[in-house]
Image (cartoon, rainbow, N blue to C red):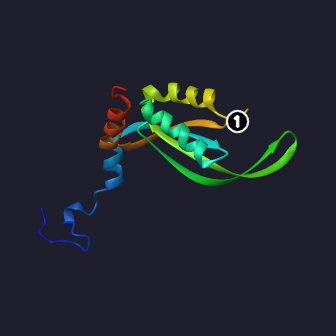
Amino acid sequence: MSDNLNSQGLSDDQDNLDVWDFYMEHNRAPVVSIVSRYQSSQDAKDAGDRALVGAMAACFHIRPIESSYVWQGSATEAQEWELDLITVPDAARELFEELLKSHPYKLPHVSASTIEVSKEYALWVSECVSRDV
């Protein structure tokens, strides 16, 4: 191995190391992001809190969004609050169904996406969701 270090502190032998490829091959695991939208930040927080207390999610994030959509034949704009919950694949269906069942909207948006995260983060999510309640 070369003792010559480049400007990034890597030896010449490590110049060709692709960190992204290494990470994607060796240090990733799936979690599920479930997203829904609410009329108020309090409604979104209440739904997130129920998911945490019920050990259906490890964490959640709430952010304001501007929505444009057609409702009952008319174009509509509204400020809504997007709730993004993180859970494990085995708990995703239960959380998805709970959000649909308890949502204040007549026709709520609830979507689920599998995302790749570090194995350490996925383990933390799993520990949070599998805890006794």
Name the residue located 26 percent from the left edge and 70 percent from the top edge. 8
Name the residue located 52 percent from the left edge and 26 percent from the top edge. 93
Res 7 seen here: yes
Q: Nearer the viewer, residue 112 or 63?
A: 63
x, y percentage for residue 33? 50, 39
Q: Quadrant of the N terminus?
A: bottom left
Among all residues in the image, which is located at the extreme bottom? 7
Instruction: Examine the rendered structure and indicate whether residue 61 appears above or below residue 103.
Output: below
Q: Nearer the viewer, residue 13 or 99?
A: 99
Q: Is residue 131 left or right of residue 52?
A: left
x, y percentage for residue 72? 85, 39
Name the residue located 38 percent from the left edge and 31 percent from the top edge. 129
Determine which residue is flagged by label 1.
105
x, y percentage for residue 92? 49, 29
Q: Is residue 12 left or right of residue 92?
A: left
Residue type pointed to by label 1: Tyr
Q: Secondary structure at mark 1?
A: loop
Instruction: Examine the rendered structure and indicate whether residue 97 appears above or below residue 124.
Output: above
x, y percentage for residue 35? 57, 41
